[in-house]
Amino acid sequence: MNYRTKTISHWCIENTSSAPFNWSIKNAALLVLISLSIITLLTSCSNLMNPTIASEEGLHLTPIPAETLAAYQEGAPITTKLQVVIAARAYLETTRLRSTMEPKVISVVEEHPNIWKIVFEGEWLVNPPDPDHTYTPPPPEHGCIYVTIDATDQVRTEIGTSACPP
């Protein structure tokens, strides 16, 4: 029997040295590598396909359309970070503090049960108390402000300045 016509079983029987052992280690290593790749791929895909994870992890950091803010109803239940941010932005609309551009959400943290602190970064200015009174407002200032909201009743809402992260 020449080399070209030998079957795998003949080759393994005739060459019982280290060749079959090396062949199985290479296959095992390849199998482990393929298995890890598949597990990693499935794990990442399952996170992307899970709407709860997708909406909670970063959606509250995206700009909020004006229509969404206009449709907000005070006292609506707050159960997600996005709803906390919408409530905070809606509250900002009731104050004299204005951002010259879409404020950027820096953080959303539940400090105590149902008490949330939302930090926004932006270019801020204060509207005059009397809109009919004409005056030249100072230029907007870059900085961070925070809003705290009680998610249960939204009664204890505060606003203040905060140091921006470096």
Image: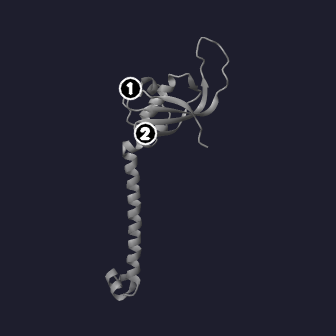
In the current view of this chain or complex, which residue is farthest to the left? 9
Q: In the figure, residue 70 lies in which quadrant? A: top left
Residue to which mark 1 is pinned: 75
In the rendered image, is residue 65 in sight? Answer: no
In the current view of this chain or complex, which residue is farthest to the top? 132
- In the picture, the quarter occupied by the N terminus is bottom left
In the rendered image, is residue 75 in sight? Answer: yes
Identity of the residue drawn at 47% across and 30% down: 88
- Crowd around label 2: few <14 · some 14–19 · many ≥20 (10 Å): few
Mark 1 belongs to which amino acid?
Gly
Residue to which mark 2 is pinned: 112
**Which residue is at the front of the view, 166 or 102?**
166
Identity of the residue drawn at 34% across and 80% down: 8
Identity of the residue drawn at 39% across and 85% down: 3
- Crowd around label 1: few <14 · some 14–19 · many ≥20 (10 Å): few
Across and down, in percent, residue 164 comes to 59, 39
Q: Secondary structure at mark 1?
A: loop
Marks counted in the figure total 2
**Which residue is at the front of the view, 99 or 38?**
99
Across and down, in percent, residue 80 comes to 40, 37
Residue 55 vertical placement versus 14 (above, below): above
Mark 1 to mark 2: distance in Å? 19 Å
Q: Secondary structure at mark 2?
A: strand
Q: In the figure, residue 17 lies in which quadrant? A: bottom left
Is residue 17 left or right of 102 when viewed as pictured? left
From the viewer's perspective, is the residue at label 1 or at label 2 nearer?
2
Across and down, in percent, residue 42 comes to 37, 55
Is residue 80 left or right of 62 when viewed as pictured? left
Across and down, in percent, residue 32 comes to 39, 67
- In the picture, the quarter occupied by the C terminus is top right
Identity of the residue drawn at 38% across and 59% down: 39
**Which residue is at the front of the view, 36 or 13?**
36
